[in-house]
Image (cartoon, grey):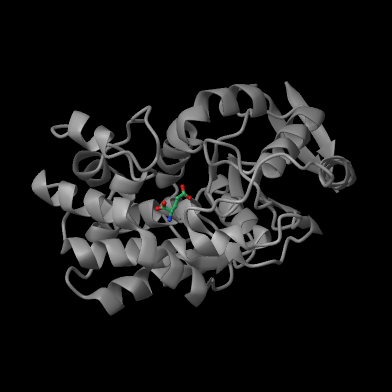
Amino acid sequence: MVKTISVSQIEQTVHEAHEIYSKNLNGKNADYIPYLAHIGSDLFGISVCLTNGRTIEVGDSRYKFGIESVSKVHTAILVLRQYGADKLLSMIGADATGLPFNSIFAILLENDHPSTPLVNAGAIAACSMVQPTGNSEKKWEAIVNNITLLSGSAPELIDELYRSESDTNFNNRSIAWLLKNYNRIYDEPSLSLDLYTRQCSLGITAEQLSVCGATIANKGLNPKTGIQVFEAAFAPKITSLIATVGFYEHTGDWLYSSGIPAKSGVGGGIMGVLPGIMGIAAFAPPIDEAGNSVKAQLAIKYIMNKLGLSVFSGDSVSITA
Ligand code: GLU
């Protein structure tokens, strides 16, 4: 079936979602990273970027928040760009662990079996793979440049978040060294962990994440800049990784109820990808017990359901002006 939706319908739905959920007081800012505990709990922004480059924004869509785990998607794309799809699968993997994103247990259980670049262990391994090996500054440049290309504008390091996270990331230090024990890290563990911590501490806006989502939805062609950031064939690979594990242990419930593959981060951001149609991002700091922003989840679900969109519907969607 061909489904026709107008831009004004999308605009109205995005505004409704913001209006309905802005008063929601559920959830609590992440506090295991001290910086995140102090971000305004009532910040709330939504941005949709269509694959034709049209953006629809409401609320705090230009507020720079900690990208956190959403950055795992960006660096997985960089690994795809530098190594190709087969190497990402053999060196990291694409399976959900079914365990929390920072699980040590998952590494022990899967010591002969790689996991996914979208949980901490796989994301630290992904940072270790970024070329050129051993050169922290050049690797960092590659990571930031890749995020800039995907987002259409540059992210900005939040120094205070980086310090806060570096001072308290004991669990991630254990992960990096355990990976070393199992030969699943491909550069020096401390260097790889530092890159991971820095990328999580980048400030990004909902608008930038929506452009990145739209770039993936648009087969690697950034609809804002016109730059082909990655090979079209990688788009379904990256969307499948997001669909499998983007919402931690709640990924199945999320996909079932929202119909859109999305990646969330404990900074309160969520980035969704609807192939061929749009990227959508929402940001609100209070998160649930699994680490997903309460308001951002509700808003994206509302928009998807109200517009009758789902990655599984089989509909082809035409968006009219
Ligand atoms: N930097 C955070 C950590 O490693 C990211 C967590 C997340 O957003 O899931 O714990």
Q: At 37% across and 67% down in the image, what residue appears?
A: 167
Picture coordinates of residue 195 (x, y %)?
A: 32, 66
Q: Is residue 289 above or below residue 47?
A: above
Name the quadrant containing residue 21: top right
Q: Is residue 37 above or below residue 318?
A: below
Picture coordinates of residue 63 (x, y %)?
A: 69, 66
Q: Is residue 317 above or below residue 287?
A: above
Q: At 30% across and 56% down in the image, what residue appears?
A: 170
Q: Is residue 291 left or right of residue 9?
A: left
Q: At 53% across and 50% down in the image, what residue appears?
A: 266
| Nearest the eye: 210 or 17 | 17
Picture coordinates of residue 177 (x, y %)?
A: 17, 53
Q: Is residue 251 left or right of residue 102?
A: right
Residue 231, can we see it? no
Task: State which quarter of the image contains the N terminus.
Answer: top right
Q: How many marks?
A: 0
Name the quadrant containing residue 104: top left
| Nearest the eye: 240 or 169 | 169
| Nearest the eye: 80 or 1 | 80
Q: Is residue 225 left or right of residue 166?
A: right
Picture coordinates of residue 4 (x, y %)?
A: 81, 33
Q: At 36% across and 58% down in the image, what residue appears?
A: 78
Residue 291, can we see it? yes
